[in-house]
């Protein structure tokens, strides 16, 4: 039987123990560790090992330590399995005698105490963590009253109209045609040649007749 070097008394996260032959096992609280094993903690793990003399060793996250006798001063003699108690020895002898006599040892052995059975020993690995979703609801409260943003609009400046409403204006009749149109006046062209004035009606068919008086 291998001699134990200590017991895992506390564990956070994950940790492993690598034996001399290279086998790796996951550690749990209550597991035994043995000399020359390499203890390794995970990225978020931490472990506490209690030695037979009562001393403890803490190992933080992402760390390694070798349980060698030179570093930790392991006393192999102190780590041996303790001698069974006298009543246990007597019970074993009684069971052996019953088997030799052909009797059923369960009929002569003392009844076990009531209560839950012994917890199963650790065989490595880790249990799945199950978190039940209870759909909790809560109303957030900041501790003081809050209001929405306040917007204040300024009064517009007064506007001066070009026409005062108090002025009396003549009503506009949309059917009023307005003043009578003015007849156009045909202009008269006077041509002066010397002392001769001739009206423009002397122009006929684009030809201007001019009389010249020579004196």
Image (tube, helix red, strand yellow):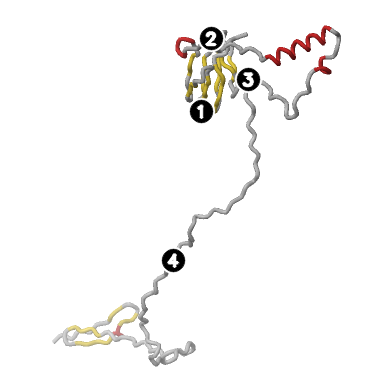
| Label 1 CA crowd tier, 10 Å (few <14, some 14–19, many 20+) | few
The percent coordinates of residue 70 (x first, y second) are 45, 10
Q: Using the image, tell me which numbered label, if any, was put on residue 110.
A: none
Which residue is at the far right? 102
Q: From the viewer's perspective, is the residue at label 3 or at label 4 nearer? A: 3
Q: Is residue 183 left or right of residue 106?
A: left
Dot 2: element = loop
For residue 214, what is the image quadrant?
bottom left
Number of marks present in the image shown: 4
Q: Using the image, tell me which numbered label, if any, was put on residue 44.
A: 1
- Quadrant that contains the C terminus: bottom left
Q: Earlier in the sequence, mark 2 or mark 4?
A: 2
Q: Earlier in the sequence, mark 3 or mark 4?
A: 3
Q: Using the image, tell me which numbered label, if any, was put on residue 124.
A: 3
Q: Is residue 172 left or right of residue 139?
A: left
The percent coordinates of residue 45 (x first, y second) are 52, 26
Residue plotted at (53% across, 11% down): 35
According to the picture, the residue beneath numbered tag 2 turns out to be 76
Depth check, front residue: 24 or 47: 47
CA distance separating discs 2 and 3: 24 Å
Q: From the viewer's perspective, is the residue at label 1 or at label 3 nearer? A: 3
Dot 4: element = loop
Q: Earlier in the sequence, mark 2 or mark 3?
A: 2
Q: Earlier in the sequence, mark 1 or mark 3?
A: 1
């Amino acid at each position: 039987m291998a001699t134990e070097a200590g017991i895992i008394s506390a564990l956070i996260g994950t940790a492993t123990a690598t034996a001399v032959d290279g086998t790796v096992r996951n550690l749990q609280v209550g597991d035994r560790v043995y000399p020359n094993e390499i203890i390794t903690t995970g990225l978020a793990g931490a472990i506490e090992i209690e030695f037979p003399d009562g001393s403890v060793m803490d190992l933080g996250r992402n760390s390694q330590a070798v349980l060698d006798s030179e570093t930790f001063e392991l006393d192999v003699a102190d780590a041996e399995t303790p001698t069974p108690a006298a009543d246990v020895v007597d019970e074993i002898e009684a069971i052996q005698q019953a088997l030799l006599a052909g009797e059923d040892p369960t009929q002569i052995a003392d009844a076990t105490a009531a209560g839950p059975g012994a917890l199963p020993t650790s065989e490595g690995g880790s249990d799945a963590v199950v978190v039940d979703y209870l759909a909790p609801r809560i109303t957030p409260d900041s501790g003081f009253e809050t209001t929405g943003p306040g917007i204040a609009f300024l009064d517009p400046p007064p506007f001066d109209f070009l026409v005062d409403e108090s002025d009396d204006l003549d009503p506009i009749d949309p059917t009023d045609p307005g003043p009578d149109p003015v007849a156009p006046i045909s202009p008269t062209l006077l041509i002066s040649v010397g002392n001769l004035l001739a009206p423009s009606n002397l122009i006929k068919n684009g030809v201007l007749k001019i009389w010249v008086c020579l004196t």
